[in-house]
């Protein structure tokens, strides 16, 4: 199987989990911008209240995910996308949860939804390519993995997944 990355809550810039699997930097500054950009700019008090509520759900979801409580994390991320439907990282993390729950087709749907809002989300492109590669859809996987490399040339994972995908194609 192709490799996958860990959950991300930073606008597609870096992982929100360290190599130990523990969540770190769960609520970056970009999260605030991403949420506030989705609410009514004419109602400042509503904006701040919405930010606090969504931020609370994100923090809870990240904590649940870090503790391996996938069902609880999923419920909280679903609340996030209901309140902030264009927040790409919530969809991305729902995709990761579905992958961890061995539900790759649902993961693919969430990754595609995340890309609708952030088409250059390198980790999401990587995981979407990996999911298609793992399902034997190599011709579909390769363009996603190539886009991931273009979106973030320093990210190693899409390059590794491309190699794995090409190796599987030869077999």
Image: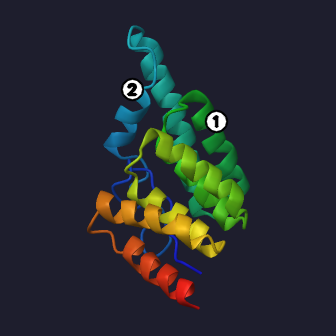
Residue 149 is left or right of residue 17, and the answer is: left
Which quarter of the figure is the N terminus placed in?
A: bottom right
Q: Which residue is mark 2?
A: 37
State the image coordinates of residue 29 (x, y, percent, origin top left): 32, 41
Q: Residue at x 43, y 83 (%)?
A: 163
Q: Is residue 112 above or below residue 127?
A: above
Q: Residue at x 34, y 75 (%)?
A: 156
Q: Is residue 90 above or below residue 151?
A: above
State the image coordinates of residue 76 (x, y, percent, origin top left): 64, 43
Q: Is residue 128 above or below residue 84?
A: below
State the image coordinates of residue 129 (x, y, percent, origin top left): 52, 65
Which quadrant of the structure image shows residue 17?
A: bottom left
166 or 68: which is nearer to us? 166
Task: Indicate which disc, 2 or 1, sits on the residue closer to the N terminus.
Answer: 2
Residue 70 is left or right of residue 168, and the answer is: right
| Residue 149 seen in the figure | yes
Q: How is the image coloured?
A: rainbow
State the image coordinates of residue 13 (x, y, percent, origin top left): 33, 55
The extreme top residue here reads 42
Q: Residue at x 44, y 50 (%)?
A: 9
**SS assignment at label 1:** helix
**SS assignment at label 2:** loop
The dot on residue 105 is none
Q: Which residue is mark 1?
A: 79
Real-space Cα distance between discs 2 and 1?
17 Å
For the residues bearing labels 2 and 1, Cβ distance under 8 angstroms = no
| Residue 17 seen in the figure | no
Which quadrant of the structure image shows residue 47?
A: top left
42 or 160: which is nearer to us? 160
Q: Residues within 10 Å of mark 1 (few under 14, many from 20)?
A: some
39 or 135: which is nearer to us? 135
């Amino acid at each position: 199987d192709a490799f996958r990355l860990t959950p991300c809550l930073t606008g597609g810039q870096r992982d929100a989990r360290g190599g130990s699997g523990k969540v770190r930097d769960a609520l970056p500054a970009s999260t605030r911008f991403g949420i506030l950009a989705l609410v009514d700019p004419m109602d400042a008090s509503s904006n701040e209240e919405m930010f606090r509520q969504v931020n609370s759900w994100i923090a809870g979801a990240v904590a649940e995910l870090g503790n391996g409580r996938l069902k609880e994390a999923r419920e909280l991320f679903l609340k996030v996308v209901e309140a902030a439907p264009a927040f790409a990282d919530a969809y991305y993390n729902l995709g990761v949860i579905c992958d961890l729950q061995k539900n790759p087709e649902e993961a693919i749907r969430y990754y595609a939804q995340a890309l609708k809002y952030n088409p250059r989300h390198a980790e999401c492109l990587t995981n979407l390519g990996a999911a298609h590669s793992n399902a034997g859809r190599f011709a579909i996987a390769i363009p996603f993995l190539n886009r991931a490399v273009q979106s973030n040339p320093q990210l190693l994972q899409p390059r590794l997944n491309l190699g794995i995908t090409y190796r599987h194609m030869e077999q």
